[in-house]
Amino acid sequence: MLIDGAKEILAESGHEQFSLNEVARRAGVSTAAPYRHFSNRDELLSAVAEEGYVTLAEKLENTSGLARLGGVYVRFAHDNPGLFVTMFRSRPAGTESAAGRAAFATLLRAITAAQQSGEIATHASPEITARSLWVTLHGLAVLHLQQPHDRYGLGGEPEELATTTLSALLGLKIDDVIRGSE
Amino acid sequence: MLIDGAKEILAESGHEQFSLNEVARRAGVSTAAPYRHFSNRDELLSAVAEEGYVTLAEKLENTSGLARLGGVYVRFAHDNPGLFVTMFRSRPAGTESAAGRAAFATLLRAITAAQQSGEIATHASPEITARSLWVTLHGLAVLHLQQPHDRYGLGGEPEELATTTLSALLGLKIDDVIRGSE
DNA sequence: ACCTGAACACCGTTCAAGT
DNA sequence: ACCTGAACACCGTTCAAGT
């Protein structure tokens, strides 16, 4: 499967080093062969991204509690940096990701649940709250990936980073956040 | 100047399309010439990134109020997407950005000031608070750049996105955030 | 000190031709 | 329907040679 080969390369070499020719080489076919399955390099990467969104959405679906949700998001990026970057690379205009929408919908559901259970209390709508928390987790994930040497304290464990950051922003007591994640 | 040419290309074509050969072409020299000034493509991009950090730090330095600070950060990304991506691309291990540290220090100072003036009230340390807010603004900037068609409401004006997001997270009344940004 | 010209291995992509 | 082989324009990088 070309997509699996592409994922391997992303895991080993990262998004910047990804090469369609190497995918072909690994599959044991000529460099022209992938073009029978994908119209170009970008389409293959988009297919890879879709699978990434599905995996991430599954992980989020099985998680409750805001801090744990955040931990899952940042850990996914930590464990699959090449895939994560590929998922969130700038898309060609007009390209929609169905699985990406599904993943966000999962996050929205989880955050709405956290609001209803009283875990978090904000004046903003669930949509805006979810978007704001997503943005925060995403920034945390991205900067964590780029600061391998613990610059700015961003090199810690994904779960701890998520807890600390959410706690600082939402003004919750540390205990509340920890209790919400158990 | 090679760095200026590189910035032009980043502004016109973006980080993904950046080519060292084109920098040389634009400067009217052979493709080997840049190697007399930079040891490779990556070093030139790092030099470009440093200038970007200096520019961003200057803009932050001249801004007070948390919401306006956020607006400046997201607008910088909006107005200079290629440069912004270049600044925050994964660095070769062991590479430190002095100007990047300075930019963060500026953010830290501004946020400490906002805490002292009572604009924001959190239990966390200034460092953690600054890091958490940076992470949020960064995620907002990154996702804003990647969602040109207003998906998830991320396509709005940078200043409005910053205000809405900070307001939702910090649980401030909208009025407070707006007053802080004037 | 700085630049050129030519070369190398590598890319993404196309296309005629083969099965 | 799927793949190959060869070609194209493009990359980043090196290096001997020129001024």
Image (cartoon, coloured by chain):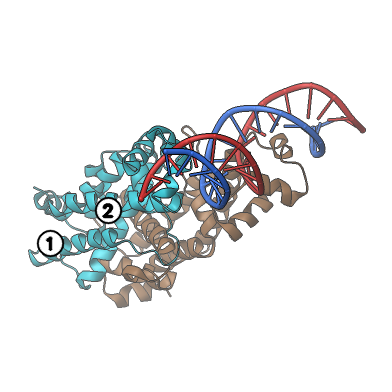
Chain colours: A brown, B cyan, C red, D blue
Q: Residue at x 12, y 62 (%)?
A: B114
Question: What mark, if any, has residue B53 been given in the picture?
Answer: 2
| Quadrant the C terminus of chain A occupies | bottom left
Let me know if residue A169 appears in the view: no
Residue A104: % across, % down: 45, 50
Q: CA distance from mark 1 to mark 2?
A: 22 Å
Between B30 and B170, the residue placed more toward the observer is B30
**Residue at the image position 30 percent from the left and 45 percent from the top:** B77
Is A31 located above or below residue A125 in the figure? above
Residue that carries the numbered disc 1 in the rendered image: B114
Amino acid tagged 2: Tyr
- Specify whether B122 is left or right of A86: left
Q: Chain of mark 2?
A: B
N-terminal of the pair, mark 1 or mark 2, is 2
Q: Which residue appears at 30% of the width and 57% of the height?
A: B136
Decide which of D8, A34 is in the foreground and name it.
Answer: D8
* Chain of the residue where label 1 is placed in the rendered structure: B
Instruction: Say whether marks 1 and 2 touch (CB < 8 Å).
Output: no
- Above/below status of A135 relative to B83: below
Mark 2, residues whose alpha carbon is within 10 Å: few (<14), some, or many (≥20)? Answer: many
- Residue A132's mark? none
Q: Does residue A40 lie above or below B86 as drawn? A: above
Q: Residues within 10 Å of mark 1 (few under 14, many from 20)?
A: some
State the SS at label 2.
helix
Tell me the element at label 1.
helix
The residue closer to the viewer here, B36 or A101, is B36
Give percent across and percent down for residue A4: 68, 53
Residue A44 in view: yes
The spot of residue B175 in percent (x, y) is 12, 50
Give the percent coordinates (x, y) of residue A111.
38, 58
